[in-house]
Amino acid sequence: MFKILEKRELAPSIKLFVIEAPLVAKKARPGQFVMLRIKEGGERIPLTIADYNSENGTVTIVFQEVGKTTRELGTLEAGDYIQDFVGPLGVPVEFPNHKKVLGIGGGLGIAPLYPKLKMLHQQGVEVVSIIGARTAELLILEEEIKAVSDRMYICTDDGSKGRHGFVTVVLKELLEQGEKFDEIIIIGPPILMKIGSEITKPYGIPTMVSLNPIMVDGTGMCGGCRVTVDGEIKFACVDGPAFDGHKVDFDELIKRLATYKEEEKISLERFNEVHECKLINKIEGVDKDAVK
Ligand SMILES: Cc1cc2nc3c(=O)[nH]c(=O)nc-3n(C[C@H](O)[C@H](O)[C@H](O)COP(=O)(O)OP(=O)(O)OC[C@H]3O[C@@H](n4cnc5c(N)ncnc54)[C@H](O)[C@@H]3O)c2cc1C
Ligand code: FES
């Protein structure tokens, strides 16, 4: 069992947990993730290690409540426990000999971007970052990204903070102005990673993306997470999740992510029904545990 030491709400429906997990924290490296299961019988979901402290034995995760499991996770509080917290999984990222890197994070993608930029900053690499969200309210980890960046741009789709428009607008501008980078990291919704990679390709700048296919075991046993990279099948959980954005088949990834849409919807509706019943029972003073 893994204790939640701290809970923070970063934005509506986006939560940060600091989890006590010394063994994971000891081995964690930027680019890796964990598979967690809230309780017996629950599903296993992958979440990126957004930060870790090997001395304190803590691992930070940031998640968005998009469906049943993440919604249920969001109901837990500091002091509660998570049944399984397996990791670190996936291949750590490395940036040998880099001098200047551009990091781009869209929406929730800012969380997995953070540990990579933090490591680069600690290595003395010049870090430029562009972070964006739909609205100012949904922008997360701004202070954390700023602390590890030499220069930071903020974009919002509705113009409520920073530049009005997508992060790719600033990316295009920097490249058109002739700014050079040893590598560009783009993490966010698959469509952002796809368009961003298309923008950087003609400039020949290595572009790293972090893929988020559906995962089951997270250890290379099932192929649920398979993606096509450079015409070859790869398992994102053991070969990634970071890949060369110029070689990823994003259209296939986007299609595969929609595979279980109907089942996910039904599962969330069931979860909401039970929780609404619990709420009514509380109000009426009925034993809430009687509702399963
Ligand atoms: C390597 C990896 C790292 C990830 N890191 C994070 C993270 O740090 N924070 C975070 O909030 N999420 C992260 N995800 C996505 C996260 O695993 C899903 O949001 C979660 O599994 C959804 O479960 P659910 O039961 O709440 O929703 P579901 O009911 O399963 O899904 C609800 C909606 O979310 C979409 N969805 C489901 N699974 C994924 C997925 N794997 N990626 C993208 N969209 C999905 C579905 O299409 C659906 O529309 C990561 C995924 C991978 C593969
Ligand atoms: S999740 Fe099963 S092989 Fe990757």
Image: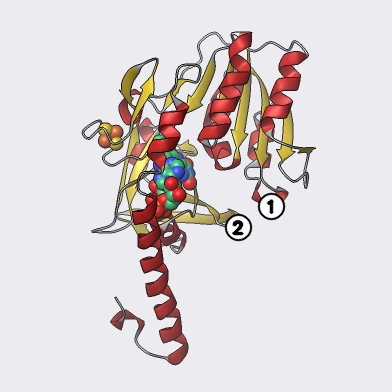
- Residue at left 34%, top 23%? 239
Ligand 2 appears in which quadrant? top left
Q: Is 148 rendered above or below residue 43? A: above
Disc 1 element: helix
> What residue did someone put label 1 on?
137
Disc 2 element: loop
How far apart marks 1 and 2 lie (CA) works out to 8 Å
Horizontal and vertical percent for residue 168?
67, 28
Q: Earlier in the sequence, mark 1 or mark 2?
A: 2
Q: Which quadrant, please, contains the C terminus?
A: bottom left
Residue 212 is at least partly visible in this image: no
Residue closest to the eye, 272 or 76: 272
- Residue at left 50%, top 11%? 96
Q: Is 5 rendered above or below residue 51? A: below
Residue closest to the eye, 82 or 112: 112
Q: Is residue 247 left or right of residue 194?
A: left
Q: Is residue 273 left or right of residue 109?
A: left
- Residue at left 36%, top 16%? 231
Residue closest to the eye, 156 or 17: 156
Toward which corner of the image does residue 91 lie, by quadrant? top left
- Residue at left 46%, top 28%? 250
- Return the mark for residue 12: 2
Horizontal and vertical percent for residue 272?
42, 69
Are circles 1 and 2 on residues that touch, CB within 8 Å?
A: yes
Horizontal and vertical percent for residue 268?
40, 62
Toward which corner of the image does residue 121 lie, by quadrant? top right
Mark 2 surroundings within 10 Å by alpha-carbon count, few (fewer than 14), some (14 through 19), many (20 or more): few
* Residue type, mark 1 in image: Glu
* Residue type, mark 2 in image: Pro
